[in-house]
Image (tube, rainbow, N blue to C red):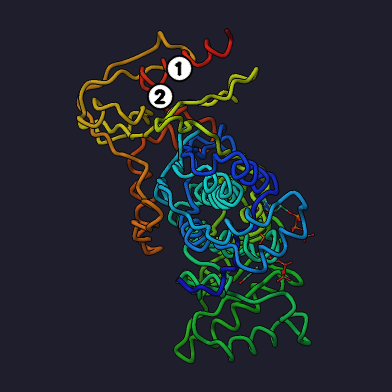
Amino acid sequence: MNSLIYDNLTLHTDKYQINMMYAHWVQGTLNDKAVFEAYFRKLPFGGGYAVFAGIERIVHYVQHLRFGDEEINYLREQEENYQEEFLEELRKFRFTGNLHAMKEGTLVFANEPLIRVEARVFEAQLIETALLNVMNFQTLIATKASRVKQAAGEDILMEFGTRRAQEADAAIWGARAAYISGFHATSNMRAGMLFGIPTKGTHAHAWIQGHDTEEEAFRRYAEALPNQVTLLVDTYNTLKSGVPNAIRIAHELKKQGKKLNAIRLDSGDLAYLSQRARQMLDDAGLNGVQIMASNDLDENIIVNLKAQGARIDSWGVGTQLITAADQPALGGVYKLVARERKGEYLPVIKVSGNPEKMTNPGFKDVYRIVNKETGRAEADYITLREEEDVKREERIKLFDPVHPYIHKFIDHYEAIPLLHPIFSDGELVYELPELQSIRSYHEKQLQLFWPQYLRKLNPEGYRVNLSMKAWQLKMDLIHQHQE
Ligand SMILES: Nc1ncnc2c1ncn2[C@@H]1O[C@H](COP(=O)(O)OP(=O)(O)OP(=O)(O)O)[C@@H](O)[C@H]1O
Ligand SMILES: O=P(O)(O)OC[C@H]1O[C@H](OP(=O)(O)OP(=O)(O)O)[C@H](O)[C@@H]1O
Ligand SMILES: O=C(O)c1cccnc1
């Protein structure tokens, strides 16, 4: 991984985290261990699943946490409360804890731990903000991209979002997230260089406007880039000028033993125009010339265009994807679930009038329960760490926490642990996978689920269940607090 994209992100945190670190230092509790879990409460885009992403950046962030002179001087200036000895303590700061997380590309669901941090509270508190920042954005874009991919099927998908993204980081990490979920290429050259994503590009309207005629513009462009050229045909009049000019150029290329790769439609009725353009190309003997579309596309428009019989072979998707336009935030949270007291972990809960905001207490694990007969996932199962039955793949009870009387027992299953060790006592113990293998892992993940959980519109809710013990612990703590 090229380190060019990484700044020192140590102060990429909210001031309240440093205030709490300071208060722990003052009170002598900084070394007490704490366990936090990151998760989201509601699936985005009204979908049935999300695609987890962000670990690569999080690993680099955690590995490089350092308070240097610049950071320390800044903190000294900013907060008169901070004592010099505290700032000295920060100089020694390293992440020394354990961090477990889902693998990038995993299909994930609401209310299950995606990242679990067990560390000195001093460390675990600092990293909340950056962890959520990265996880929320990258997971959101990977999820949106997966929906677009579902709509496009086997068609080629290009990520065109950079110019409309919320700044540079969002553009490149968003391009990476899209690639994980099955996009084929990005237009962002830096994302290509940094992550090894294939890059593709056509040309802009400016190229056409910059010549006396559209035909001349096409010809000059094809002369310069004769291999795999795609011509944008909508600058003046798609059917009367753009397509006929492109056909002329295609014939000229043919004579040179070259080939026009595609035309691109970027405005107007894409269903109608693609059908007419297809006919014109076919009539000219150019069946091999493909049609590409762009213009504020998203998964719904793509499905709709296909339903209208659009003849589009490849799709350029920008704004709607990179900004997650219909849901601009995932809403992931990072909650304390256990804290050390006298050398033992004490489970803690956040009680709330809103049942959705009630946390699941305790040091937990999460397993994907895969039916051995069907090979499909039945549920994700959250247990307390010490529970053994699921590890031994013995009979477990799946029940709906909202309606506990609805339950079923399951015997013949494989329990796949979803949280993988990433840092152990501060050491990186996880080998970051190649982007290609994250992408193929994601594809395999999709095959693990029945289609009713994956469909874009009104999917069935996939079960995320608490074990009886985890549920009982939650009930006990709620009752304790009520008393
Ligand atoms: N047949 C179609 N069915 C549904 N949506 C379509 C169809 N054709 C195009 N769209 C989408 O409708 C929107 C049209 O956007 P807009 O109103 O900006 O039109 P435009 O053709 O780009 O106009 P302009 O030339 O002024 O930019 C885009 O999101 C486009 O992807
Ligand atoms: O519509 P999006 O999904 O965001 O995809 C990216 C858009 O960016 C370009 O338009 P722009 O008007 O910026 O430049 P152009 O002059 O090359 O068309 C391109 O033609 C797409 O329409
Ligand atoms: O290559 C393209 O056609 C392209 C790239 C970025 C944005 N819009 C289009």
User: Badge 2 is on which residue?
Assistant: 465
Q: How many marks?
A: 2
Residue at the (59%, 78%) spot, across then down: 247
Of the residues shown, which amino acid type is indicated by label 2?
A: Asn
Residue 275 visible somewhere in the drawing: no
Count neighbours of disc 2 (C-alpha within 10 A) and say few if under 14, some if 14 to 19, many if 20 or more: many
In the visual, does 142 lie left or right of 264?
Answer: left
Residue drawn at x 70%, y 88% is 216
Regarding mark 2 in the picture, which secondary structure is present there? strand
Image quadrant of ligand 3 equals bottom right
Q: Amino acid at mark 1?
A: Pro
Relative image position of residue 357 (x, y in whole percent): 60, 25
- Does 312 appear above or below 237? above
Residues packed near mark 1 inside 10 Å, few (<14), some (14 to 19) or many (20 plus)? some
Q: Secondary structure at mark 1?
A: loop
Which quarter shows the N terminus? bottom left
Q: Nearer the viewer, residue 348 or 215?
A: 348
On-image quarter of the C terminus: top right
Q: How far is mark 1 from mark 2, CA to CA?
A: 7 Å
Quick check: marks 1 and 2 in contact, CB under 8 Å?
yes
Residue at image mark 1: 401
Q: Position of residue 342 (x, y in %)?
A: 43, 30
Q: Judge by depth and name the residue closer to the eye, 7 or 263.
A: 7
Quarter where residue 69 is shown: bottom right
